[in-house]
Image: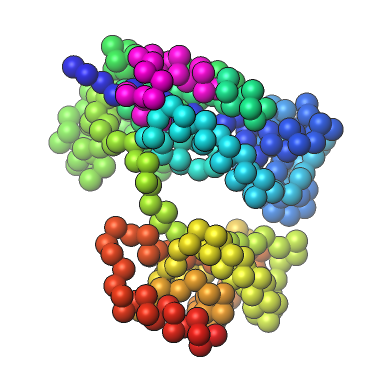
Amino acid sequence: MDHRKIIHVDMDAFYASVEQLDNPDLRGKPLAVGGSEKRGVVSAASYEARVYGVRSAMSGAMAKKLCPDLLFVKPRFERYKEISSAIRKIFFEYTDLVEPLSLDEAYLDVTVNKKGNPSASLIAQHIRQRIFDQVGLTASAGISINKFVAKIASDYNKPNGQKTVNPEEVIEFLEKLDVKKFYGVGKVTQAKMYEMGIYTGWDLKSKTEEFLNQHFGKSGKHYFQIVRGIHTSPVKPNRERKSLAAERTFRENIASEIYMIERLESIAEELQRRLKNSKVSGRTITLKIKYSDFTLQTRSKSLPYFVNEAAIILETAKELLYQEKMKNSVRLLGISLSNLNTAKSSVKKKEEVEIIQLKFDL
């Protein structure tokens, strides 16, 4: 049986590593990108900070408590995009089947590749060396017969390492895997599986498809297949963007709706910039509100036409803001645009005309 050769490349502590690359004074020191010791959330942590338990999505205050010497730097997304673009150019020298997952990771299908190299492991090694030589950053990689196993394997020898799971090793590899590593197994499902005595892939594999369907609904079939190495999702080079967003975490909690409107203005302008840089428009506007007690609320409205202008986005966001009384003071506001015109179904000419008319009206 012929197998695909899939590589998952994952940059090591990407945002933090870029900051240390550009500023030698930060090298070897515990570093957090984003947040502060009082407010905000950590976007990325250097390996020096991870030793203390600092992780992404952790509050800055908690991170500082865990690591008193932690240094905070503001994220520079334009710089990260620049570096990411240089890395992707390297990928395309080996294959056109590249599916970016984010700025710092991507799948590559090298079953048939531009170098004519039959060894996916050697290709991964070459790519990692090229990234280091040309960009100055380290990357880790996982190599296997499908995207699922390759992604898990890339995490095994981090940082600056790689792991290959050959076709004949896949089943044993999955059987030993903790179920929390499987796609679709979040904290709630993990707890449920543990209660049932399902701790590893071996335990999961012992259950019938009927049993899994009964206890996990539509996901049952997925678990039944994936633990047997059945994951046929191809590498999709033209992965569709589903939404674009911009948000802000505030230094002080905001209770006044007037101040919230002021913040939403700048957020809408930032979202407009991102939309126009990506050359997309959308129809569904979602307002994200995180309260001071960290509870999260979203409010959405779909328009009958595509938009990418800050003024229209802001007016809709304001309408959503006034839709319901604030439950508490607010620490974060965000606006996202979904139902983008990048969908496979073609955009009707009528909708295109409406976008133009809206622009003239402004």
Task: Determine which quarter of the picture holds residue 134.
Answer: top right
Give the residue at x 78% y 26%: 28
Give the residue at x 69% y 53%: 40
Q: Position of residue 177 (x, y in %)?
A: 39, 22
Q: Residue furthest top?
A: 168
Task: Determine which quarter of the picture holds residue 32.
Answer: top right
Where are the magenta residues, as a range?
A: 108-128
Residue 223 seen anywhere in this rendered image of the structure: no
Q: Position of residue 232 (x, y in %)?
A: 25, 33
Q: Relative to the observer, which residue lies in front, 308 or 194? A: 308
- Quadrant of the frame with the C terminus: bottom right
> In the image, is 348 to the left or to the right of 99?
left
**Relative height, residue 142 to residue 240 (above, below):** above
- Quadrant of the frame with the N terminus: top left
Q: Position of residue 201 (x, y in %)?
A: 32, 23
Colouring chosen for the image of the structure: rainbow
